[in-house]
């Protein structure tokens, strides 16, 4: 019975996110502002159902759903939507939904195809409080990077628009004025930095909690395990972004591409490494 | 000599440059990607040299940054001398003393810490807010150096070895240079209902010069720490002892359970045990299977196999890593300095007040990425207010 509730919650979440994407698409075609509110409402409801599903699973399994690929993929999608809604509240960029929500839809679909929905008990190495902090920080970091990917894509689109179309000075008000669907490139650029800075802090925490935990369980804080190495690569890519921005004044297309590249590294760390490179993190 | 010095300066500049740092960072990324396919790269000269260069560059960059910071603190701010970098205001009928007082009060109200100095041109007020935050970036890079240094110290002076100890039994760590030995009294595996391992635990006595110094249970995620050495529970398994007999020949074996025992012969037989089940393969194809029991011979073709003993062993990783304190210090520093760098903005403002023919000339410059202009505006507004007041009083 309780598994059935979780299943329903999962499916409903997926449909609500897909519906949200469609409404955002409808907004780009009709430019009717009421559609934004509707879409955000649908996605918000999706997040609520998503949370209910996760709580349900926690109750069923008797632990937080932090232990295998299926669980983490579902959490990742949750983090992306949460980060999107927070960003949307602080700096409304409605078109962000068109890029970011499909990321969550793809993640949820991928999760639905995973065969490891079966609940297996926690292996000894995972029985540590570090698991919680390690995974929780990863959700926040990856959620933020999912949104930064969306902002990066929007930047590139904005930047390639003809000048006549992008002649607005203030980004947020440009949307309400109906002059352009996208805020100015400067606004997007600033937003990109803020989201990546946030994600970077949490990715640093992911690496540190992972290292402290690995020291406790294996006696080696760093082992050049593929997952570790790719997490480090991701960290270095974003470090490059921040350095380029702070000291070299990198802005615009270059940083937007770096944000996209960074997210590609995130995805590869999660899926590529898990399926292509066996290692210490093989908790599929 | 001069030429050499020039060359050295040039080399130093390149070496400590941010561009080289970024290039090395890219190189580390590329090498790490290669490393996930070929792990050997991380111990190759390529990677080590690049990391070493990056570390030196990091340190040099940080030193240069710190030096510039200190210099900027001490010296007269260049922004007040370069045309276009500062803003100017003429306060008619206002003495420099009055302007200093008013400007100081306003800066204090905005939350600045003040320092008033007499300089050649008049009086300079420097105000700073969150001045300590400029240390964020240098500390962050120092944290990185700590972590790298920690791993080098661990690599050079650290020591580690894996022990498989039959239980009950002793692990003579002192033979390998550790300060104590271990006596494993008991070992047990807790399992879930489905038979998978939940936790495994060794009950250990630490023997210092053959005297019991400490007793502790070690399990996964719960290591033992004594005299700078840590003992981790990392594995467990079983050893099978027995013999293979054929006519008048007998060969003893002692293998890890799960490893194949080669019986040979024309059928190329191979025996694998998952206690108590055993499987026999011929040329890799299943041949026969059954249940084994200690002391009970199993007959396969012309051979007789007998298992005499099955012992549990506990797998313990023993490690001494003197680099760890540096690593932890690096991590803590990272966590303190990163938010400092990204979220606390240090803020500086300078006012130069000098007497002019009509009253006071004010030069104003600020350094703050976001709010600099805003604050300048506030000060200017306040100060021009004085002139308005004066004029009102006079008229």
Image (cartoon, coloured by chain):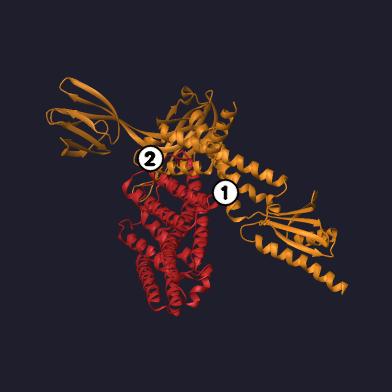
Chain seen in red: A
Classify A269 as above or below B256. below
In this orientation, which residue lies closer to the viewer: B245 or B315?
A: B315
Indicate the secondary structure of the residue bearing disc 2. Answer: helix
Q: Chain of mark 1?
A: B
Residue behind mark 1? B335
Classify B65 as above or below B307. below
In this orientation, which residue lies closer to the viewer: B2 or A108?
A: B2
A133 relative to B79 in the view: left or right: left
Name which of mark 2 and mark 1 comes first in the sequence.
Answer: 2
- Judge the density around disc 1: few (<14), some (14-19), many (≥20) Cα neighbours within 10 Å: some
Kindly report which numbered mark, 2 or 1, lies closer to the viewer in this rendering. 2
- Judge the density around disc 2: few (<14), some (14-19), many (≥20) Cα neighbours within 10 Å: many
Establish whether labels 2 and 1 are both on one chain. Answer: yes
Instruction: Name the image quarter holding the N terminus of chain B.
Output: top right
Q: Residue at x 15, y 31 (%)?
A: B268
Instruction: Name the image quarter holding the C terminus of chain B.
Output: bottom right
Which residue appears farthest toward the right when viewing the image? B394
């Amino acid at each position: 019975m309780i598994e059935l509730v979780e299943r329903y919650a999962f499916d409903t979440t997926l449909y609500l996110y897909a519906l949200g994407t469609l409404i955002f698409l409808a907004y780009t075609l009709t430019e009717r502002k009421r559609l934004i509110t509707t879409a955000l409402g649908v996605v918000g409801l999706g997040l609520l159902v998503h949370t209910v599903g996760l709580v349900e699973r926690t109750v069923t399994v008797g632990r937080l759903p932090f232990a295998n690929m299926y669980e983490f993929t579902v959490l990742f999608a949750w983090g992306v939507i949460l980060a999107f809604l927070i960003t949307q509240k602080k700096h409304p960029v409605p078109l962000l939904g068109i890029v970011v929500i499909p990321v969550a839809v793809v993640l949820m679909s991928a999760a639905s195809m995973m065969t490891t929905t079966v609940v297996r008990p926690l292996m000894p190495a995972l029985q540590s409080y570090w698991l919680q902090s390690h995974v929780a920080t990863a959700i926040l970091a990856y959620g933020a990077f999912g949104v930064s990917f969306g902002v990066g894509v929007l930047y590139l689109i904005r930047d390639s628009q003809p000048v006549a179309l992008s002649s607005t000075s203030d980004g947020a008000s440009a949307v309400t004025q109906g002059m352009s669907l996208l805020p100015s490139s400067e606004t997007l650029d600033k937003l990109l930095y803020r989201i990546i800075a946030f994600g970077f802090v949490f990715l640093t925490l992911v690496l540190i909690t992972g290292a402290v935990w690995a020291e406790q369980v294996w006696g080696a804080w760093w082992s050049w395990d593929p997952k570790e190495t790719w997490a480090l690569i991701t960290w270095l890519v974003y470090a490059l972004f921040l350095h380029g921005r702070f000291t070299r004044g990198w802005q615009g297309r270059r940083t937007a591409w770096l944000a996209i590249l960074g997210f590609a590294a995130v995805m590869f760390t999660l899926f590529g490494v898990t399926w292509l490179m066996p290692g210490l993190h093989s908790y599929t | 000599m001069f030429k050499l010095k020039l060359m050295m300066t040039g080399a130093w500049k390149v070496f400590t440059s941010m561009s080289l740092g970024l290039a090395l960072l890219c190189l580390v990324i590329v090498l790490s990607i290669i490393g996930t396919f070929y792990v050997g790269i991380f111990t190759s000269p390529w990677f080590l040299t690049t990391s070493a260069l990056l570390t030196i560059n990091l340190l040099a960059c940080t030193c240069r940054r710190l030096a510039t910071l200190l210099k900027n603190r001490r010296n007269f701010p260049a922004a007040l001398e370069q045309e276009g970098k500062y803003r100017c205001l003429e306060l008619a009928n206002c003495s420099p003393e009055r302007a200093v007082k008013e400007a100081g009060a306003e800066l204090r109200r905005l939350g600045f810490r003040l320092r008033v100095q007499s300089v050649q041109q008049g009086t300079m007020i420097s105000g700073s807010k969150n001045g300590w935050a400029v240390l964020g970036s240098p500390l962050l890079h120092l944290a990185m150096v700590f972590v790298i240094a920690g791993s080098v110290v661990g690599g050079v002076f650290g020591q580690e070895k894996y022990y498989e100890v039959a239980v009950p039994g002793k692990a003579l760590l002192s033979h390998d240079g550790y300060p104590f030995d271990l006596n494993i009294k008991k070992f047990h595996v807790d399992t879930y209902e489905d038979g998978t391992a939940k936790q495994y635990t060794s009950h250990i006595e630490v023997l210092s010069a053959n005297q019991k110094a400490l007793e502790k249970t070690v399990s996964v995620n719960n290591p033992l720490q004594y005299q700078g050495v840590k003992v981790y529970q990392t594995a467990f398994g079983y050893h099978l002892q027995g013999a293979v007999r054929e006519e008048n020949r007998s060969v003893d074996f002692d293998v890890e359970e799960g490893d194949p025992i080669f019986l040979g012969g024309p059928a190329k037989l191979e025996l694998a045990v998952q206690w108590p089940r055993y499987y026999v393969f011929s040329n890799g194809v299943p041949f026969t299977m059954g249940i084994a029991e200690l002391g009970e011979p199993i007959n396969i073709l012309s051979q007789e196999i007998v298992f005499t003993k099955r012992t549990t062993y506990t797998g313990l990783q023993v490690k001494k890593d003197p680099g760890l304190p540096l690593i932890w210090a690096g991590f803590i520093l990272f966590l303190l300095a990163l938010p400092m760098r990204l979220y606390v903005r240090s803020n500086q403002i300078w006012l130069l007040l000098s007497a002019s023919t009509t009253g006071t000339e004010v030069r104003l410059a600020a350094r703050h990425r976001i709010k600099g202009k805003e604050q300048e505006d506030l000060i200017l507004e306040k100060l021009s207010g004085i002139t308005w007041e004066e004029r009102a009083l006079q008229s």
